[in-house]
Image (cartoon, rainbow, N blue to C red):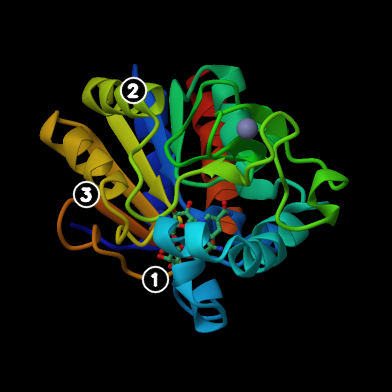
């Protein structure tokens, strides 16, 4: 594993241009510059809240207590936030044919808002709520969340966000697509994720074992850094991704 930011940014640009299948795998860190705090690290949500609010047993036993925190950390933060330079760079890559798929652990919908289409939401999403009894799916509107806990209009049971809580299974289709994308990857970006959440943290390992070159962009070292990353570019995703874009433009200009 090599670390040397300047030349690796240039190297990343070259690898993107040479790759036939590139995939990005993102976590909470890519949304930090949009104003959404990650779980871990400095200013992380778990320094302020108890993670038990995202445990199914706690949710069933105390839906109001759980929802009060869930609304504050996910719905109040997420309303009105916009994609940052890192999200926009990934949308640009997909648009130009440099990025074939994007796997996100995030539930904030910012990759969709930025314009990416080929996105696999590994942990589900926050925009829909699902009834814990009849499984009806409804949009998470401010109106529905004005009285907590929100209730199903068909059976009256509690609605749960359609993202996964601790210990819940990964949505099947997203899991299948993510494994397939990791296996096909020639180039694989890890962006803004600590690698501490399982089984999501196995996806980059699958890419590595399938022969992909792994480029990691994180503010701090992660569980991947000394294990599977071929290049570790330390810094903010919102700075690094536009820099890579600059080098792509320069490299293309040289080869014209
Ligand atoms: P994490 O909180 O465990 O780790 C965040 C990582 O991002 C750290 O490694 C940190 O070094 C890095 N980071 C912080 N700011 C950065 C920046 N500006 N640029 C680049 N890197 C930066 O996040 P995780 O690994 O994604 O795991 C947490 C779980 O919680 C995931 O399932 C995640 O989806 C979920 N979560 C989602 C959101 C969201 O949707 N925005 C927010 C909080 C947590
Ligand atoms: Zn119902």
Q: Earlier in the sequence, mark 1 or mark 2?
A: 2
Badge 3: few (under 14), some or many (20 or more) residues near its Cα, within 10 Å?
A: some
Q: Given this view, does label 1 or label 3 mark the residue nearer the observer?
A: 1
Left or right of 48 on screen, residue 4: left
Label 2 close to label 3 by CB (< 8 Å) = no
Spatial CA distance of label 2 from label 3 is 15 Å
Would you say the residues marked 1 and 2 are in contact, meaning their CB atoms lie under 8 Å apart?
Answer: no
The x and y percentages for residue 72 are 71, 66
Sequence-wise, the earlier of marks 1 and 3 is 1
Residue 12's place in the image compared with 181, above or below, is: below
Rendered residue at 23%/37% (across/down): 213
- Is residue 216 shown above or below 155? below
State left or right for residue 202 relative to residue 120.
left
For the point 60% across and 55% down, the residue is: 31
Q: Residue at x 59, y 36 (%)?
A: 131
- The answer to whether the residue bearing label 1 lies less than 8 angstroms from the nearest atom of ligand 1 is yes
Which residue is the site of mark 1?
Answer: 220
How many residues crowd mark 2 within 10 Å: few (<14), some (14–19), many (20+)?
some
Q: Furthest-left residue in view?
A: 209
């Amino acid at each position: 594993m090599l670390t040397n930011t300047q030349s690796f940014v240039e190297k990343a640009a070259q690898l993107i241009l040479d790759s036939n299948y590139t995939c990005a795998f993102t976590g909470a860190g890519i949304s930090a510059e949009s104003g959404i705090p990650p779980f871990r690290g400095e200013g992380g949500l778990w320094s302020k809240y108890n993670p038990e609010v995202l445990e199914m047993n706690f949710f069933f036993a105390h839906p109001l207590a759980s929802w009060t925190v869930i609304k504050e950390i996910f719905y109040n933060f997420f309303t009105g936030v916009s994609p940052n330079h890192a999200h926009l760079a990934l949308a640009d890559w997909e648009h130009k044919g440099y990025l074939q798929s994007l796997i996100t652990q995030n539930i904030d919908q910012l990759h969709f808002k930025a314009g990416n289409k080929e996105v696999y939401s590994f942990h589900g999403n926050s925009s829909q709520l699902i009834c814990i009894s009849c499984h009806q799916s409804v949009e998470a509107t401010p109106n529905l969340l004005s009285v907590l806990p929100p209730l199903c209009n068909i059976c009256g049971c509690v609605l749960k966000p359609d993202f996964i809580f601790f210990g819940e299974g990964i949505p099947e289709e997203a899991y299948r697509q993510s494994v397939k994308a990791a296996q096909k990857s020639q180039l694989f970006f890890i962006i803004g994720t600590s690698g501490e959440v399982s089984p999501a943290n196995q996806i980059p390992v699958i890419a590595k074992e399938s022969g992909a070159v792994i480029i990691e962009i994180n503010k701090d070292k992660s569980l991947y850094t000394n294990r599977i990353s071929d290049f570790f570019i330390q810094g903010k995703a919102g700075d690094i991704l536009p820099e890579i874009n600059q080098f792509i433009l320069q490299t293309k200009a040289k080869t014209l």
